[in-house]
Image (tube, rainbow, N blue to C red):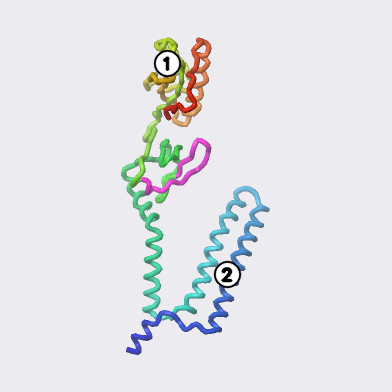
Amino acid sequence: MDDQGQYAKLFNDIDSQALVTLGVILASTILLIVASQRGLNWLANRLHGQLRFRVFALVPLTRLLILIAALAIIVPIVIEPSLRNMVTLLGAVGLAIGFALKDYVSSLIAGVVSAVELPYRPGDWVKIDGTYGEVKHVGMRTVEVQTPDDDLVAVPHLKLWDTAIYNANNGGTSLQCVASFYLHPEHEAGWVRKALRDVALTSAYLKFDQPIIVVAEEKPWGTHYRIRAYPVDPRQQFLFITDLTVRGKTVLSAAGIQPALLPPDAALDA
């Protein structure tokens, strides 16, 4: 019974000396963290180029190492260092870490699924949870998407479970672009449709082996035209849409066709 009671004793008796030691360790940890962060930030701000960002990256890593070292010193002071206590402590820590990292593990599993199903691959233009851009790298946990504004967004693979993945070119070179025009209802629709098709046919970015479609849809405030066509390279999509919009507007203005006058509360198609 005495042995069982000794094994069951998890925490040491905390006396005044132990409290002083814990206070010194805590104060030293805080001072080291503050000093390391200020020192590394001071050093990084006096460096240039890639080296500056590498030093900045050391700030959270250094803080983590200091905290781990402090915990390694504090735990034997607070907890009785017996085999059963260590197993109990490690089990509790493992359970807490496992619960905290469940999304991380889910992303890793989804990463394996993505490697088999290929919902996206480098070079694809995708839209995931509102983020649109080109896939630059597919890692084990995240997919890196570079947006048209040159932001690199890391999207976790776990989005596969409950989010729709829009893939514009799906591993190929064909990516449909849409240029919209909103016109006053009083015009010759047949001529406009032909003129917009000619605008697409004369674009330097047009991929000729793909169809050109001009879609017209009547709205209460006017007529909505859309040119659907394909650029030579998916990376040219924004140049292609701009070219279609600018030249199409020029052609329509020269023909005297007025744009639609929308009421303030009119909702346009995305």
Answer with left or right where residue 209 lies relative to residue 58: left
Picture coordinates of residue 165, whole percent (x, y): 37, 40
Position of residue 260 relative to residue 237, above or below, is: above
Snapshot quadrant of residue 3: bottom left
Answer with left or right where residue 107 lies relative to residue 16: left
Q: Residue beneath label 1, please?
A: 197
Q: Are marks 2 and 1 in contact (CB under 8 Å)?
A: no
- Res 7 visible: yes
Other residues around mark 2 within 10 Å, as few (<14) / some (14–19) / many (≥20): some
Question: What numbered label is drawn on residue 29?
Answer: 2
Residue visible at 37% across and 66% down in the picture = 95
Q: Which residues are magenta?
A: 144-159
Position of residue 191 relative to residue 12, above or below, is: above
Q: Under tag 1, what secondary structure?
A: helix
Q: Amino acid at mark 1?
A: Arg
2 or 1: tag closer to the N-terminus: 2
Picture coordinates of residue 182, whole percent (x, y): 46, 20
Position of residue 26 relative to residue 61, above or below, is: below
Residue lying at the far bottom of the rendered structure: 2
